[in-house]
Amino acid sequence: MMTSKIERLDRLVEAGVQARHGQSGSLWRQSLRRMSRSPMAICGAIIVSLFVLMAILGPWIAPYSPTAQTWGKEVFLNQNIFPGPRAENWFGLDHLGRDMFSRMIVGARQTLLVGVVATLIGFLAGAVIGGVAAASGAFGGRWGQRVESVIMRTVDIALSIPMLLLALSVAALLGPSLTTVMIAVGVAQIPIFARMLRGSMLAQAHSDYVLAAIALGVPKPRIVVSHILPNSMGPVIVQATLVLATAIIEAAALSYLGLGNPDPGNPEWGTMLSDAQRFLSGAPQLAIYPAVGIIVTALGFTLLGEAMRESLDPRLRRQE
Amino acid sequence: MLRYTIKRLLQLVVALLGLTLLLFAWFKALPGGPETRMLPDNATDQQREALRQALGLDEPIWFQYGEFLSRIVRLDFGSSLSSGRPIATELADRLPATIELSLWAMAIAIGIGIPLGYLAAKRRGSWLDFTAVSGSLVGICIPVFFLAAMLKVVFAQQLGWLPTTFRLSPGLTYTDITGLRVLDGLLTGEFDVALDAARHLVLPALALASIPLAVIVRITRASVLEVVGEDFVRTADAKGLKPQTIRGRHVMKNAMLPIITVIGLLLGSLFAGAVLTESVFAFGGVGSFVYQATTERDYPALMGFILVIAVSFVVLNLIVDLAYGFLDPRVRVRS
């Protein structure tokens, strides 16, 4: 099953592991130094920090309430009259006469929350599954290897199902809500994280310091938790950054399919974007603001993740 | 190669069995069970029990799984709860549209992506390289349904260059052979049909191609950059081979391996994108069916779709892996 995808994930993992062996000094400090010289990383970091700031401070910096239909009388849906940008409403009004600018600023928080929670679900569940598989495979003897094999075959099958389908089936179980979207997107990421952490941990399990720890008589559970696990996290964290971008886009897609937040009181970019589809020909700006928000944010996380991956890749480092 | 193929086929069977098991568990875990959706809200417990018996839901679980499997093998997925038609017929009617759309999108992505990625690698650091790389980074970040909707508004509604919805203009008669309308039109000599179907395909295919295109450009560029640095390329150059020969036989042949892998991986996101694109253009493929099934909670229909797509995805991946083994002798030897 899926040898190709697996190989690719494994290669990524190896890249992270090899980087660790190559040079002395802290890997993270070295990568940080390299990243601070990369324009890609700087762009990504600026976008991400602005987005996070907006998500934290949103309700305090927004000029108006995001839910108050203050200008409701100025919008005429059937005549396609949506007042555009003007002095008091920088981004114009939405279909219920609410201030788009305030909705965008306040909506950043929910959008970030969806991305972070979904990624965390995938990361944690994937880490547990991958970690158990790797630990039992490396230290559990013959039975452990069987456990590992069963777990990983199941993960491989899940990997072979397209992500949106996994998300759709989870959403069908839970009914439409923002929580559903988070769980659905998160669950769809579990197999990737499980694969990556297992590969990364197995590579660490063969290293000299683990052998030394075994020789010193350190109990095996402790070797796994305090030696192998912390050293295996690099490539997984890189993946998490990239997944955050995917999660925000996927969440918007699920909202568009009607599985998102039915509560209009709490603005979120994905829901705003899918709501705006109804007025697309008359008022495309209603879709463009949240879409640009999503694209720029996803781009920020992608740039940051790619820059991190490059700074960890030993093949690219040699060129310096 | 034969042993490798047989081994992969056996793995395929195991994977498919695992898949049906997962799907069965999923179907069992759905809230309320299928009988809730089929009965009116005020149904009595007696009616409920009768329906459960009629559906075989009171049998032991392993027996139900056996029934489930044997029905799947006979391609009997039950009837759609919203349209009442058999799901297998529904899917068979709609699959050609999705396949046609996906093929065109993939053709666009591969046809533009590989040459563009190659050029970007050849002229590393040029404006072309910069545009290709940044364009592909932005490309994967654009939600497909938004892009599809914007293309529709601009090119179909406002400029009026291309049709907004459906696969054919109303009033055109066509002969059905393969279900792929452009191909059918060409085969039967109905060139007006072929042209009209192609015009309907341009916008959805472009929208659907965006993500695969972005990914293929990046992987081609990276892969070519890696290969041109190899010693055998320098040797080929040193012994005076023509640049075209080096490009075709040495660089591209070796660079193709990761590209093929990625194309195989993209098929999954292509299906997902098709669901979203088709619903924007009312394209009448499997995608719109799923959109409808999702919004109306038509679980049997959704399950039939997931099964068909997952099976075709698993089979396509097998084909990609076999192609990989065919191109790269090392894959064969290792297994």
Image (cartoon, rainbow, N blue to C red):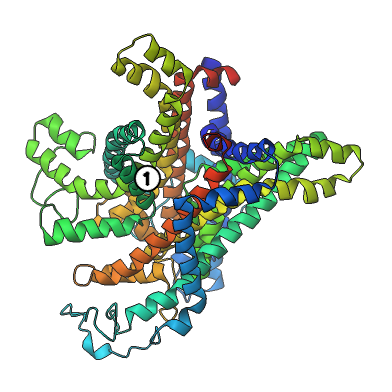
Q: Which residue is mark 1?
A: B270
Left or right of B176, for residue B18: right
Dot 1 crowding, Cα within 10 Å, few <14, some 14–19, many 20+ = many
Residue A285 sits in which quadrant? bottom left
* Residue displayed at 48% across by 28% down: B321
Q: Residue furthest right?
A: A217
* Residue displayed at 24% across by 79% down: A85
Left or right of B184, for residue B215: right
Q: Where, quadrant-wise, is the N terminus of chain A in this rendering?
A: top right
In this view of the protein, which residue sits in the foreground, A220 or B275? Answer: A220
Residue A267 sits in which quadrant? bottom left
Vertical relation: B150 (above or below) A59: above
As helix, strand or loop, the secondary structure at mark 1 comes to: helix
Counting from the top left corner in percent of width and height, residue A215 is at 90, 37
- Asked if residue A9 shows in the view, the reply is yes
Left or right of A96, for residue A108: right
Vertical relation: B143 (above or below) A21: below
- Asked if residue A177 shows in the view, the reply is no
The disc numbered 1 marks a residue on which chain?
Answer: B
User: How many numbered discs, if any?
Assistant: 1
Counting from the top left corner in percent of width and height, residue A222 is at 84, 49
Counting from the top left corner in percent of width and height, residue A290 is at 35, 68
Mark 1 residue type: Leu
* Residue displayed at 50% across by 54% down: A304
Counting from the top left corner in percent of width and height, residue A277 is at 28, 67
* Residue displayed at 52% across by 33% down: A4
